[in-house]
Image (cartoon, helix red, strand yellow):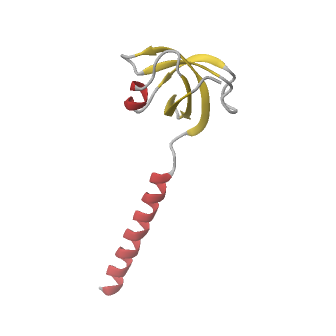
Amino acid sequence: MKEMTRRLIVIAVLALALAGCRAKLPPGKRYPIQGEIKYLDTTANTATIDAGKIGDWMEAMTMEYPVKPPADFQKLHVGDHIQATVVVVDPGYYVTEVKIVPKQ
């Protein structure tokens, strides 16, 4: 009986440890982005951003990005210059960790 209880405790501890490790991994591949806000769609929480090259993912271009969380979207205005993170997930992508910065 003691051996069975001991095994269950070890299994429970390992399961919790693995769950904790999984929670720390960021979903998708993450890239820094810098650009200017050209348009905001308040119904879809998307921003059209004129951005420079984004790592090995995309060349410089202007395109629409979903912005998450909504608090990050709420602080944006057309003409803002931003630094943020693009998270590429399967399927899709979104911008997060948005910071408004002075124009360079």
Q: Is residue 57 left or right of residue 65?
A: right
- Above or below residue 67? Residue 15 is below
Q: Nearer the viewer, residue 15 or 99?
A: 99
The answer to whether residue 65 is visible is yes
Q: Nearer the viewer, residue 77 or 48?
A: 77
Residue positioned 46% across, 18% down in the render: 77
- Above or below residue 83? Residue 39 is above
User: Could you say where residue 80 lies in the image, as x and y percent from the top left?
Assistant: 52, 20
Q: Is residue 1 left or right of residue 74?
A: left
Q: What residue occupies the far left of the structure in this picture? A: 1
Look at the image and tell me in which quarter the N terminus lies. Answer: bottom left
Look at the image and tell me in which quarter the C terminus lies. Answer: top right
Residue positioned 48% across, 53% down in the render: 24
Residue positioned 68% across, 26% down in the render: 53
Q: What residue occupies the far bottom of the structure in this picture? A: 2
Q: Nearer the viewer, residue 92 or 84?
A: 84
- Above or below residue 12? Residue 75 is above
State the count of labels.
0
The answer to whether residue 92 is visible is no
